[in-house]
Image (cartoon, rainbow, N blue to C red):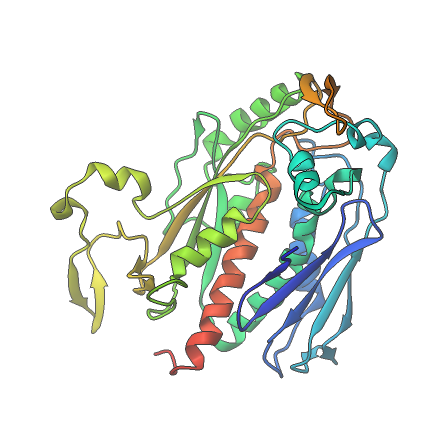
Amino acid sequence: MSSSFGQVFRIHTFGESHGGGVGVIIDGCPPRIAVSQEQIQHELDRRRPGQSEIVTPRKELDTAEILSGLQDGVTLGSPIAIVVRNTDQRPGAYDEMAAKYRPSHADYTYDAKYGIRSASGGGRASARETIGRVAAAAVARQVLDSLHPGIEVLAWVKSIQELNAEVDPESITAETIESNIVRTGDPAMVEPMIERIKAIRSDGNSVGGVIECVIRNCPAGLGEPIFDKLEADLAKAMLSLPATKGFEIGSGFSGTLLTGREHNDAFRMIDGKVRTLTNRSGGIQGGISNGETILFRVAFKPTATIMSNQETVTSDGENTELQGRGRHDACVLPRAVPIVEAMATLVLTDHLLRQRAIQPIS
């Protein structure tokens, strides 16, 4: 089971949803980087369950324990191990699911691949696995701040079903996003989105949507020209997240409706720098950042586990019905915002360190 990500700044996550704990081992973090445990905890608090009335009520403090790699708050250059203990497991809620596959969940495919699975909470298929990613990204964020300050990574809920937020990627702030429990950047859409999630949950159902993410002040030159293109690694990072079903960058699929003359981003010299007058490329050309704002979107499907009867089969191959139990998000998007930011931060940090091995970034 591949649980590693990155080449230079490399992480390896571990743990199951209802096991003893989850966490991450970070390898390749440069030495002598000041790391604040409070900053790590802040990011974990943004993604933890039970934080508002529209997310899963599972009660976990998600307290981070740093086991290695730091001395007096400074990285040693050795592997950093971070663990978060699980304290509110309820495996009994999954007794029926141990014998019945949840539709559109990983239950069947895990059995098909491994012949065994952790039925409680979905094991590694649970979004609880992303705790390790968020903790690692909080360290990566501090590496970025030390080596190349000024890079900003912000994500927000762009849409829930047809409810679409109007957000200016160049001016949106973290304060605006974090000022509401749905984490959208459009104040006019806060209540409609909250009410939609509540209505869906009360019906025993779930709903999906789109998260948009902007990377501002990214230097030109990050990314590789062939297989490790910056947008390819961003796409892999985002599509490795639970419940993701789509990724697009810049003009995305809408760009297919334009001609080359309409779509091309014209170059001009502005204040002594090569700039583009438009940004349909989304800040990346030929797999390499061009210094413009990077903008991408990630599609999240409705949560698979719903509190309604569904047709399914048992692990013995018998047709049956299943009604979901346990504590689950009716919409994953509000808690997925910091996870999208985390994966983008991990990709940037890895590529920044790879580029520093070639030449200093101007």
Spot occupied by residue 163 in the image (x, y as percentages of width and height): 45, 27
- Residue 342 placement: quadrant: bottom right
What is the tally of numbered marks visible in this picture?
0
Quadrant that contains the C terminus = bottom left
| Residue 49 visible here | yes
* On screen, residue 33 above or below 333: below
* On screen, residue 10 above or below 360: above
Left or right of residue 168: residue 54: right
Q: Which sits in the foreground, 125 or 254?
A: 125
Quadrant that contains the N terminus = bottom right
Q: Which sits in the foreground, 208 or 194?
A: 208
| Residue 148 visible here | no
Left or right of residue 54: residue 58: right
Left or right of residue 179: residue 25: right
Q: Determine the residue positioned at 44% across, 80% down.
A: 356
Spot occupied by residue 22 in the image (x, y as percentages of width and height): 76, 55
Q: Determine the residue positioned at 32% across, 65% down.
A: 291
- Residue 132 placement: quadrant: bottom right
